[in-house]
Amino acid sequence: MGRSDWPEKLFENIKVHAGEETAKTVTEGDGNLVSLEEKSCWASRAIKSLDEMVPDEDTRRQIMTACSCPHTEAPIEELRAFYRQTGDIDRLIEKTYRNPFFIMPVRNGNAIVCTKAPRHPAEYAAAKTNRERRFYYCHCDFARASTEEISPTHCYCGGGWYKKIWEAIIERPFRIELVKSVMLGDDVCRFAIHL
């Protein structure tokens, strides 16, 4: 069976940073994942294996941020041109406030702090249990339906989405930090992009 896109990205990024044997072991059983429950169960096991086989947190962070979804809707070119013209991070952040794609990032010292919006806002607001809130908030089909504990390592995939956007705009690499996650019992998912 062939891999679906996300497990394939995970395999390739583990291979680059930790070798092919580690990639094969971590992603074992990734064929024919159909339901959200199957995907979440597989991902929970895979990321737990990644945590065990790749003890260096920075390496795991690199692997997972590279697995993030593309940011095709972001107005990258417009914001990059604005930043090239002004060179001002604070004005750039202010400009993102006018764009519904961004959820009002804030400057906190030497970091841009981004909070994700819920995937399904109305359902999230009406949710009665933590599991429901997690399901309706999380954007990841490989995590949101999980009945098992999800490693915080997994959440760096979602953080990679922000990392790629801000690196494309500001044209330099950044380190991303997980600040909050609904998978860890928080009410939101929040990341800090360290400038």
Image: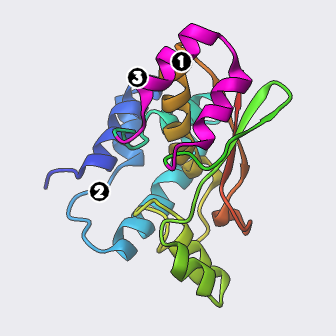
* Quarter location, residue 57: top right
> Can residue 82 be seen by looking at this rendering?
yes
Tell me which residue sits at (26%, 47%) in the image: 5
- Residue ID at (47%, 74%): 145
Nearer to me, 175 or 6 = 175
Judged left or right of residue 4, residue 27 is right
Residue bounds of the magenta highlight: 73-100
Q: Which mark is residue 77?
A: 3
113 with respect to 45 (left or right): right
Picture disc at residue 51? none
Q: Residue at x 34, y 38 (%)?
A: 72
Amino acid type, label 1: Phe
Q: Hey, which residue is sitting farthest left in the picture?
A: 1
> Spatial distance from mark 3 to mark 1, Cα to Cα?
9 Å
Mark 1 neighbour class, 10 Å CA radius: few under 14, some 14 to 19, many 20 or more: some
187 in magenta = no
Q: Nearer the viewer, residue 65 or 91?
A: 91
**Mark positioned earlier in the residue sequence (3 or 2):** 2
Q: Please name the residue that numbered disc 1 is placed on.
A: 82
Q: Please report whichever mark, 1 or 2, sits nearer to the chain's N-terminal start.
A: 2
Name the spot of residue 17 as percent of width and height, x first. Answer: 47, 24
Q: Secondary structure at mark 2?
A: loop
Q: Is residue 147 at least partly visible in the picture?
A: no
- Mark 1 and mark 3 in contact (Cβ < 8 Å)? no
The residue type indicated by label 3 comes to Glu
What is the secondary structure assignment of the residue under circle 3? helix
Q: Are marks 1 and 2 in contact (CB under 8 Å)?
A: no
Front-most of 78 and 181? 78
Question: Which amino acid type is shown beneath numbered disc 2?
Answer: Asp
Q: Residues within 10 Å of mark 2 (few under 14, many from 20)?
A: many
Q: Marks 1 and 2, Cα distance to the nearest angstrom?
A: 42 Å
